[in-house]
Amino acid sequence: MELFDPVLLARIQFVLCVFVHFIFVPLSIGFGLFLAISESRYYKTKDPKDKANTRFWAKIFTTTFAIGVATGITMEFSFGTNWANYSRFVGDIFGAPLAAEALLAFFLESVFLGIVLFGRDKISPKLYLISTWLVWFGSALSALWILIANSWMQTPAGYEVAADGSKAVITDFWAAALNPSTLARYLHTVDSVIILASFCVIAIGAYHLVSKKNIEAGKKFMKVGAVVGTVTVVLMLPFAHMQAVVVAEEQPSKFAAMEGQWEDGPTDLAFFGWVDEDNKTTYSVGIPGGSSFLASWDFTAVYPGLNTTEKAVADFSEYPGVKVDTYQGGNPPVNFVFQAYHLMVAFYVLLIIWLVVAWLMVRKSDKGIAPSKGALRLLMFGPIIPFLCINAGWIVAEVGRQPWVVFDLLLTADGVSPAVGAIELLITIALFFVFYLILVVAWLRIMLKFIKGGPQALEEAPVAADTIDATSGSKTEGGEQ
């Protein structure tokens, strides 16, 4: 493919948009959960320090949420300008979930975020607590609708193609919304973004312990981050398994590429390796039939290899591990998908190691022993691991469905806008890069300022009204309720 090929440039531009947007969306969903957890603690303890922690997470969440909204707007322009044919093809399908995301999820999140920011002394503590949880629920609901749209691109359902082939028309909303990969992708994705936020919380706690500022808050952040991180890392095992099963059954070319399998047969589970695409050979070390076992609990389960999936039309009805009857053909960049998949698994192992270190430091803190500064500094870099893990998984999901922009229905090359040339794309890529650079730098400066300042203990609320009991001489203070 030529460097100035409009299809390649359109893909590069969209990768830039999605990559930057996907920095902030996972963090906002994860930070929203920790905001709600912090307020739940304050509701129980009424400790001003816990109240300060809630205010801290509200600042962190709001800043990230705002930048996430800004980076999402450019994606809409990209759909309409560079991917017009794709937009026309999926418009009837995507209209409902994207409208639901805006009307049901985004408004819910925004309204209750306003209450969280400005309603502390104007509503009851219980309603304020509920508002923090609804902020997080709104962000999680927003992710659901977006993932419904994306999952339909991976495993289309509830549609029929118009007679002229120009668009997909929805025939069953619930079949389209609950397509074969929706649940697995949603659980996998939301769990991964909470893992990322957990490691950020651990890192912030480690920073305050190293700097000896807000030591008590640092200890709390370390512990709650380690607890949530442990739960979500463990849950990732069944969620990832669900996702792998769907890929094996519905996207045989992606499943074969993940393990570099060229011939039909049981799919091995490689620990590491290299794919020679020119000679159609994979050099790897792993467990024979391991991936077949993980997908179907049978080491001998047969899945089609890349030599079969590259055919113009392949019949998969004879393969017991695959649900797809026919496939139109074409393979993704095999070695790219293979390496991304195994990097994702390697990063997951690193997540476990980092959590062990975090728990050792939490245990030392609980015993009154000063944690190792070296270990704390190591934990401060922890968020890099889940961030890389998430993006490796994103590469597997999106590059793995190539050459299709809508799997088995619309080729990526057919989804671009024919009227947009290489010059226009190069200009917009440069403009988007500058725009995103400004946003990311601004976000980092604000976030680092918040993190370095940390949560400050609030002074006791001023007395709203003082009444003196004339008989007993006692003073009653009307404070925050």
Image (spheres, grey):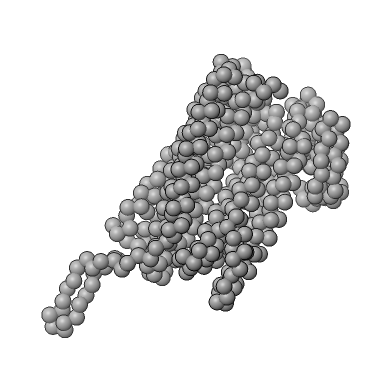
Q: Residue furthest left?
A: 470
Q: Is residue 417 above or below residue 309?
A: above
**Image location of residue 18, percent across then percent down:** 56, 36
| Residue in the picture at 39% in, 55% down | 131
**Image location of residue 392, percent across then percent down:** 67, 43
* Nearest to the observer: residue 116 or residue 199: 199
| Residue in the picture at 62% in, 59% down | 378
- Judge left or right: residue 71 versus residue 336: left
Q: Is residue 434 above or below residue 147?
A: above
Q: Is residue 408 above or below residue 367?
A: above
- Judge left or right: residue 81 versus residue 160: left
* Nearest to the observer: residue 209 or residue 107: 209
* Nearest to the observer: residue 38 or residue 109: 38
Q: Quadrant of the C terminus?
A: bottom left
- Judge left or right: residue 161 versus residue 58: right
Quadrant position of residue 35: bottom left
**Image location of residue 282, percent across then percent down:** 85, 39
Q: Quadrant of the N terminus?
A: top right
Please tell me how many numbered marks the rendered image carries: 0
**Image location of residue 111, percent across then percent down:** 37, 46
Is any part of residue 172 visible from this angle? no
Is any part of residue 422 visible from this angle? yes
| Residue in the picture at 72% in, 47% down | 343
| Residue in the picture at 52% in, 25% down | 428
Quadrant position of residue 123: bottom left
